[in-house]
Image (tube, rainbow, N blue to C red):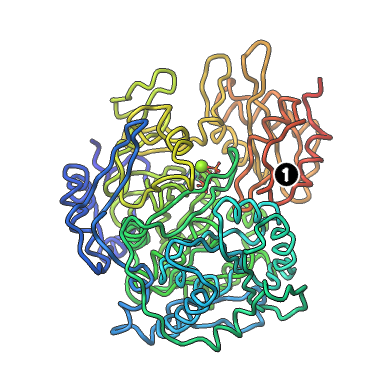
Amino acid sequence: MADTAQATGAYTASADFIAKAHIDAAGYERMYAASVADPDAFWREEGQRIDWIKDYATVKNSTFEYGKVSIKWFEDGTLNVSANCIDRHMATRANQTAIIWEPDDPKVPALHISYAQLLEQTCRMANVLKAHGVQKGDRVVLYLPMIPEAAYAMLACARIGAIHSVVFGGFSPDALANRINDSEAKVVITADFAPRGGKKTALKSNTDQALLHCKDSVKCLVVKHTGDQTHWTEGRDFDVKAEMAAAKPYCAYTEVGAEDPLFILYTSGSTGKPKGVVHTSGGYLVYASMTHKYTFDYHDGDVFWCTADVGWVTGHSYIVYGPLANGATTIMFEGVPTYPDAGRFWEVCAKHKVTQFYTAPTAIRSLMGMGTEWVEKHDLSSLRLLGTVGEPINPEAWNWYNVNVGKGRCPIVDTFWQTETGGHLITPLPGAIPQKPGSATKPFFGIKPVVLDPANAALQTAVEADGVLCITDSWPGMMRTLWGDHARFEEAYFSQYRGYYFTGDGCRRDGDGYYWITGRVDDVINVSGHRMGTAEVESALVAHAQVAEAAVVGYPHDIKGQGIYAYVTLMRGVEPTEALRKELEAWVRTEIGPIAKPDLIQWAPGLPKTRSGKIMRRILRKIAENDFGALGDTSTLADPSVVDDLIANRMNKA
Ligand code: ATP
Ligand code: MG
């Protein structure tokens, strides 16, 4: 295998960064080799980074064999996740800030919540839940803004062994009702309103609508956050803050088994009906805390900011569980990157002296379009490391992030992972693995990726390879099942490539052994026999100075088999003209090759995205195929109206 320290064309962290990093290049090689050579021994030791009530004797017990898939870690150990995230830090960190809450409105003061306060609020919330009859194993749906109560509620569920399912506050009443019903939740915790970007979403009113489609017994606990008037159903609705204030300030934690579920989280639905991914307690926490520490090179005293919403797995693992298990200071941000102006991210970084900043490529691209003056206004000297997650980052955006935000001195960790994986799967470790823009680089400890030929499932043994990304063996943080549907779990992830976990993503491995995610396998197009990831064509389009965003899909083409259909959003103020269309065609031709030249380019004022900012390509595919009668589940779209415009102006009208 190539020496990671000398990967070709790579960016290496500064000598200063490397000197202070938890893990250097040699350390990575040694630990990685140990983790795959003897997983039992490796994880037996790593499992000790959290506190167990009863220590485990068994470490790993899993099989990926189709029909018998079963995944267990530390199965005879017992613990409590909330005790690990709070109580165990009390002796040394009671007065340290656990959570910095930054409100939507910058004029409202931020809150600094210490570990002692976090303990008290979590206990009060836990006592409220208990008073409403919530017991170990019961499900609680959280439909909340990004407010401290969201963290209290997650940790309170964990404290009493209840299973939370967080539903993003931007979702519709329908989506909420589906999740309450699918998980058979006893209680939903919501708020009156969710302020975001200066606007207010009526969460309580959405919940009222959702509950019309749920069992009458579901109780609704309401956080009066903005204090605005809402409809109130006596006997069903309860004022959480008032009840917390009246509740006892301490609640003993419940001992749970390592394999007892911690949460259910529905995937974002970019490829179909959302799946209720189940994560359990012990393995998940070990993995979340370990990846948080090493991927972000977290040290005591750092201020860690992950901009995700807690409605996504990223918020679970890297706002709440990973950081708090490590006794970190973590930021919870209620707002959006562009409110009150496009400098908000950087203003918050400067204000709280953020050391690690973790966001999504889509956010970077949108801020990129607004110019660098917004970044330059703020002092970003506290930043040591940057991260991205959610989709491949195109090199153009990587460079912008590196130069303008990181000032060329912050390593960028491009973390590839999924709701299903609980934590990072493939990511640079910042002091150890040189980065290449657009590559998630190398596997995390214990992860054994393989590249298979999608045509015949053959294992690609050469270092340089192209195909679909699968994982050979389980790791502690991976999901255990889909809620109530183990058959769908096996079907979705273990049936197509027998003996492997199938990520659903395509990838390329380069001569240095680096992994490049090329997008969903569904998004690979076959043009005249050439397989091509849509991400590659998109990346080329976005590299053009006048293009803000691009989404590429295949459509049936008489001659080529599949043609390339590109939806292009231009930079603000750029006129869509025939000349520009020709220019973009020529541009892709020179950037990638004649084979990649788009057959059709549609100007798209907006793209259909999930609330986590992922482009819903299955919808774009339908429109490109001129078959938009049945678009499938669109309940997780951020702005359904963009779809109508795209349909009206489609380029492939029969
Ligand atoms: P669904 O499974 O319902 O379609 P989803 O896959 O969009 O939803 P997530 O679990 O949030 O929901 O996203 C995981 C996917 O995001 C990965 O499978 C991959 O396609 C993409 N992804 C995440 N991080 C990266 C990254 N760093 N580089 C490339 N792709 C990434
Ligand atoms: Mg997925």
Residue 262 in picture, x, y percent from top left: 42, 60
Residue 336 in picture, x, y percent from top left: 64, 65
- Residue at the spot 48% in from the left edge and 67% down from the top edge: 305
Q: Provide the residue designation for mark 1.
A: 570
Q: In the rendered structure, which amino acid carries the disc numbered 1?
A: Leu
- Residue at the spot 35% in from the left edge and 61% down from the top edge: 285
Vertical placement of 34 versus 251: above or below?
A: above
| Quadrant of the rendering where the N terminus is positioned | top left
Q: Which of the two residues, 446 or 187, is positioned nearer the viewer here?
A: 187
Q: Residues within 10 Å of mark 1 (few under 14, many from 20)?
A: many
| Quadrant of the rendering where the C terminus is positioned | top right
Q: Residue 327 appears in which quarter of the rendering?
A: bottom left
- Residue at the spot 58% in from the left edge and 32% down from the top edge: 537
Residue 395 seen in the figure:
no
Residue 301 seen in the figure:
yes
Left or right of 524, for residue 119 = left
Vertical placement of 505 versus 117: above or below?
A: above
Residue 133 in picture, x, y percent from top left: 51, 71
- Residue at the spot 54% in from the left edge and 48% down from the top edge: 267
Q: Residue furthest right?
A: 648
Left or right of 610, for residue 503 = left
Vertical placement of 498 versus 40: above or below?
A: above
Residue 325 in picture, x, y percent from top left: 35, 69
Q: Which of the two residues, 212 or 298, is positioned nearer the viewer here?
A: 212
Vertical placement of 356 versus 88: above or below?
A: above
Q: How many marks?
A: 1
| Secondary structure of the residue carrying numbered label 1 | strand
Q: Which of the two residues, 498 or 453, is positioned nearer the viewer here?
A: 498
